[in-house]
Image (cartoon, rainbow, N blue to C red):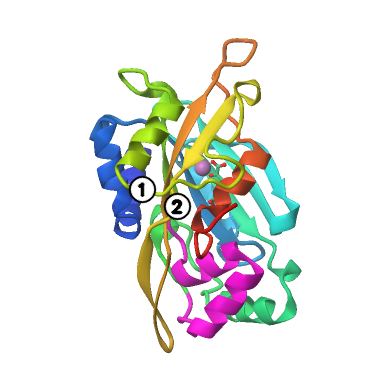
Amino acid sequence: MDARRFFDMLWQDYTRLAPQAESIRARFGGAAVINDHVAFRTFADSPIGIAQLEPVLFALGYRRHAPYDFPDKHLHAWGYVHDDADLPLVFLSELQVQLLPMISRSIVQRAIAAIPADIEATPRLFCAGRLWPAVSAAEYQQVADDSEYAGWLLAHGLHANHFTIAVHRLQPPQSLVDVVAQVEAAGHAINTAGGRIKGTPAELLEQASTLADRIPVAFADGTLVVPSCYYEFALRHQDANGQLYQGFVAASASRIFESTDRPGLLS
Ligand code: OOG
Ligand code: NI
């Protein structure tokens, strides 16, 4: 599978979980929109950890760019770049499961134990969804209370959790403030954690995101409507050498993660 087919497949999967994405993208040029980056969540020290997933990215021509740490969320991440500037960056994060409180840890470890140890890392694995039996609704809520990230991953499994419009590549040019205002005027809630716009020109990356759509998910003992996937808007700046910044900003990313928090009432 080549990289373009990979992202087409991921977009198909993602828009099933985030119906908002098709209609938002249509406002900014539809299929002509350039994706700034796509992000994935996974469990560290499992058959689907970053170490297992990233060879698929390497085979598509990506290389590691920079690592990021989110100690308060027990997350570690890498950004990946490609020589083809029209392909999105990729952001892979993983949860250090051993740092969860005991009950949540045991629920997550039971899920991880159900993943086939020899599962093959292929492009399709990146949107394979849940690779473990559904947990109960109460187990989901317990885990999400301890880690919104862990709850999300337990409920949904592997998917692109957001695509991102490259605002600096929009034709005609638009400011990030205007893009966010249009998205909001169309009725989509914006993640206000840390402010509507996160990051500054000095940090070379400004970002905003919607709140995730809510979709019904079947748990072992019934269905709950839970946050699924969201859409992001990124405006990158050039560094002192005239190179477009290719990294992420940990302080901003930490609040972007919260786009999938329940109940969506963010401070
Ligand atoms: C990723 C959040 C971080 C960014 O652009 O800073 C991120 C996630 O929600 O899994 O994508
Ligand atoms: Ni992002």
Residue numbers of the magenta segment:
132-161
Label 2 sits on a secondary structure element that is loop
Residue at the image point whose x is 45% and y is 46% from the top = 190
Q: Is 227 one of the magenta-colored residues? A: no
Label 1 sits on a secondary structure element that is loop
Q: Is mark 2 within 8 Å of ligand 1?
A: no
- Alpha carbon separation for disc pair 1 and 2: 8 Å
Residue 251 picture location, percent across and down:
67, 41
Q: Left or right of 239: which side holds 125?
A: left
Q: Quadrant of residue 32?
A: top left
Q: Left or right of 78: which side holds 86?
A: left
Res. 143 visible in picture: yes
Q: Amino acid at mark 1?
A: His
Residue 142 picture location, percent across and down:
60, 78
Q: Residue furthest bottom?
A: 221
Instruction: Tell me the residue that label 1 is attached to.
Output: 188
Residue at the image point whose x is 58% and y is 64% from the top = 148
Q: Residue furthest top?
A: 241
Q: Is residue 100 above or below residue 103?
A: above
**Tags 1 and 2 in contact by the CB under 8 Å rule?**
yes
